[in-house]
Image (tube, rainbow, N blue to C red):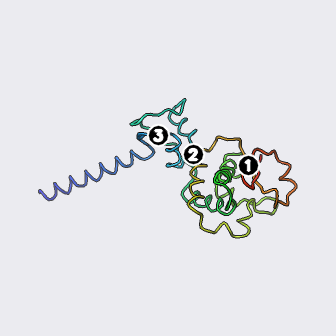
Amino acid sequence: MRKHLLSGIAALSMLAFTSSAAAAEGVHTVKKGESLWDIGKANSVSVLGLMEENGLESHEIQPGQTLSLPETDVSEEDKELLAKLVQAEAKGEPYAGKVAVATVVLNRVDSDEFPDSVKEVVYEVSNGHYAFSPVQNGEINNTPSDESKRAVEEALAFRGQGQGSLFFYNPDTSTSSWITSTDTILTIGNHVFAK
């Protein structure tokens, strides 16, 4: 009898642990010194999404405050693919340029003019050509650096902010006359970002 009772208590304890772990998913308790930016980067969600999900009108948060984390449409596989693209497209570029390349992909995902997922945007074929040359030449298959991975996390936290770049190109190597007719937003390193 005692053995069955202990088994029952162990089962209830495991059930309680599982339930509390499940309840904790999608929730973050603010730690001292944390910002929405820190929480966004750590959880692959945008600061704007965090604010909207929690009805926040400012970036002010307090230690111990519980925040609901918005759902994300970017999987771990998507983040890895995006980091590979950043590595291939922006190797040797300043860190801000790496973040901006990742941001272009996320802006495309959010735009009605492009496919609705990171994978579909990265592998998009338009007018018989891949949207991103590393897909064509195979560089998309190389291992991304830690810096490229960090740039993706930063771009995810920054998502929805900025000036809405949908394109980037290197004016010294670009052979497209169309791309140079787009509206330039900013230049970082060797890349022009445009929409």
Between discs 3 and 2, the one toward the N terminus: 3
Q: Which residue is mark 1?
A: 166
What is the secondary structure assignment of the residue under circle 3?
A: strand
> Is 12 situated above or below 69?
below
Question: Residue drawn 64% across and 40% down?
Answer: 161
The number of numbered badges drawn on the structure is 3
Residue 165 at what x, y percent from top left? 73, 46
Q: The residue under label 3 is which amino acid type? A: Ser
143 left or right of 130 in image? left
Tell me, for residue 68, which label it has, or none.
3
Between discs 2 and 1, the one toward the N terminus: 2
Which numbered mark, 1 or 3, is in the foreground of this view? 1
What is the secondary structure assignment of the residue under circle 1?
A: loop
Tell me, for residue 157, which label it has, or none.
2
Q: Quadrant of residue 150?
A: bottom right
Question: Residue drawn 63% across and 69% down?
Answer: 142
Q: The residue under label 1 is which amino acid type? A: Leu
41 left or right of 99 in image? left
> Is 62 situated above or below 101?
above
Question: Residue drawn 53% across and 34% down?
Answer: 59
What is the secondary structure assignment of the residue under circle 2?
A: helix
Q: Which image quadrant: the N terminus?
A: bottom left
Mark 1 nearby-residue class (10 Å; few <14, some 14–19, many ≥20):
many
Q: CA distance from mark 2 to mark 1?
A: 17 Å
Between discs 1 and 3, the one toward the N terminus: 3
Q: CA distance from mark 1 to mark 3?
A: 30 Å
Residue 99 at what x, y percent from top left? 64, 51
Residue with the most extreme right position: 177
Q: CA distance from mark 3 to mark 2?
A: 15 Å
